[in-house]
Amino acid sequence: MIFFYIDKKATKTYNYYIVNNYTVRRNFMKKKKLGSVLLAIIILLCMSGCSGKQVYQPIDDVSDLGGRTVGVNLAWSADYMLSGRDDMTLVRYNTVASLVMALRYGQVDFIATERPSAIEIMNCMSGLRMVEPATATDELVACVNIDRTDVLGDFNAFASGFYGSEAYIELYERLNGDSFEYHIVEPTGGEKILNVGIPTDCYPFCYIDSESGEFAGSDVEVITRFANEYGYSLKLSGGVFSTIEMGIVNGEFDIAIGTFFESSRVDTELTGTVHLSKPYMKHEIVFIEIEDPDNMKVLIPFDY
């Protein structure tokens, strides 16, 4: 059973899970897709039990999967980057939680996702293995309202200078390290107002910090650096990814960040409704496979 409780005073939403007479509370906002939702579903389904043994064959060559099935998140980078390969069959899922459960219960042989997301999954559960080397490389871009060519020009200039800089390298290493640690970049403000859309379900790229209630993530650091450098005052608005996309199209937002990919440029720009910026961050696509099916356990601690 899943119960939702909204603490209006604290403006935080919590999930309550009743499991074997224990009440497990997880903050729902910090890692929406890659944290509490993922782990809650895993806990409930794992404890419901499953019958039968599955045979797991590890990946020998990331360039040739021999026709096996791979789960990806719909319209995420791995979906775009792997769609053209004929050595695998892709199965698409709307959430990371359903993606991991598909692997757990044998609906797919492996899953593929961006390395920062893969690291979070590995931190959440035991019994899994991240396959090296990476199978593909993609880049993050910003999505800009079609009428804001001035913002597009400014961000492209920023991205060109940021990509490969010391600040870039430091952020990249944190994003791809053992566990992402968000560093606050203090906004300096400016005369120009920049309306920014931020999907809050894209940890660790962008999310709502459970303690402060503020926007956080690697992309929040990037957009704040951009605003400081080009004299903008940020007005940040959050929502699910589809809402942010619509806000860019209808002019509610000038720019949006958070899991917009270079690999989607052709499809996105064919619509003629938005611009995509120059890339500002590289990331790799990796496979995850089951290493020990009998030892798949939730590792993140819970508040009881």
Image (spheres, rainbow, N blue to C red):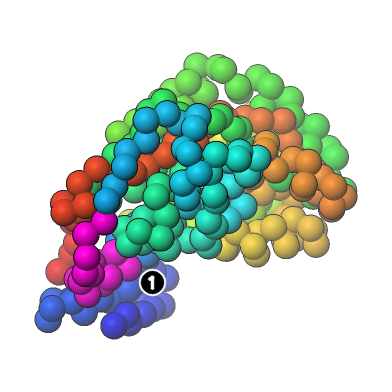
Question: Quick check: 160 above or below 283?
Answer: above
In the rendered view, does 168 fall on the left or right side of 295?
A: right
- Residue neighbourhood size for the residue with mark 1, other residues' Cα within 10 Å, grouped as few (<14), some (14–19), many (≥20): some
Residue toward you, 20 or 294: 294
The residue to which callout 1 is attached is: 13
**In the picture, residue 269 is in which quadrant?**
top right
Q: Is residue 257 magenta?
A: no
> The N terminus appears in which quarter of the rendering?
bottom left
| Residue 179 horizontal/vertical position (percent) | 31, 38
Determine the secondary structure under disc 1.
strand
Question: Quick check: 131 above or below 203?
Answer: above
In the rendered view, does 241 fall on the left or right side of 38?
A: right
| Residue 250 horizontal/vertical position (percent) | 80, 62
Residue at 53%, 56% (x, y): give it: 91
Q: Looking at the image, can residue 37 be seen? A: yes
> The C terminus appears in which quarter of the rendering?
bottom left
Residue at 12%, 81% (x, y): give it: 21
Q: Looking at the image, can residue 209 be seen? A: no
Q: Is residue 50 magenta?
A: yes
Question: Quick check: 169 above or below 52?
Answer: above
| Residue 40 horizontal/vertical position (percent) | 30, 67
Q: Which residues are magenta?
A: 41-54
Task: Name the residue type under label 1.
Answer: Thr
- Figure disc tally: 1
Residue at 21%, 69% (x, y): give it: 51
